[in-house]
Amino acid sequence: MVESRFFALRAARNSLGFARLGLVASKRHNPLAVTRNTIKRASRECFRIHQGRLPSLDIVLSFWRVDVRANYRDLRASLWSEFEHLVKHHAHSGEPA
């Protein structure tokens, strides 16, 4: 498990031959629907860009409270960094995530 200031990322190997993404953006932490939708949209976009290079992983992102208006660039940079790390660290290793 990896934690950032915006989210916790959990990853586990799967036997499907492709990566999958699960998102948790609760009302408790992000009460506005527009915030939850923006978080999910940014996450799916980053995943889509990296999906072809990711190994067979089940990835779950659980988000803390995010002020999207103030931190959207930071959120995207953090997502990008973690997906790049997954690509580099797990792409050619045989170890579990």
Image (tube, rainbow, N blue to C red):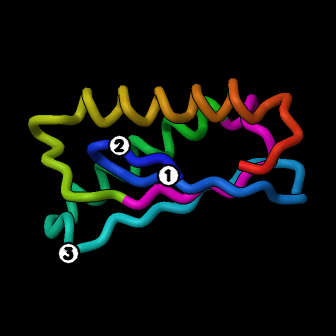
- What residue does disc 1 label? 9
Task: Please tell me which residue lies in front, 31 or 83.
Answer: 83
The residue shown at (88%, 58%) is 16
- What residue does disc 2 label? 4
Image height of 49 relative to 42, above or below: above
Q: Quadrant of residue 48?
A: top right
Q: Residues within 10 Å of mark 2 (few under 14, many from 20)?
A: few
- Marks 1 and 2 close (CB-CB < 8 Å): yes
Query: Label 2 to label 3, Cα distance in Å?
Result: 18 Å
Image height of 70 relative to 22, above or below: above
Between discs 2 and 3, the one toward the N terminus: 2
Task: Please tell me which residue lies in front, 61 or 49.
Answer: 61
Query: Label 1 to label 3, Cα distance in Å?
Result: 18 Å
Q: Which mark is drawn over residue 28?
A: 3
Give SS at disc 3.
loop
Between discs 1 and 2, the one toward the N terminus: 2
- Is 45 situated left or right of 40 in this image? right
- Is 84 situated left or right of 72 in this image? right
The residue shown at (27%, 58%) is 64
Image height of 12 relative to 54, above or below: below
> Which amino acid, mark 2?
Ser
Q: Position of residue 97 (x, y in %)?
A: 71, 49
> Which amino acid, mark 3?
Arg
Q: Position of residue 84 (x, y in %)?
A: 58, 26
Which mark lies nearer to you, 2 or 3? 2
The residue shown at (89%, 59%) is 15
Which mark lies nearer to you, 1 or 3? 1
Give SS at disc 2.
loop
Q: Residues within 10 Å of mark 1 (few under 14, many from 20)?
A: some
- Marks 2 and 3 close (CB-CB < 8 Å): no
Q: Which residues are magenta?
A: 51-62
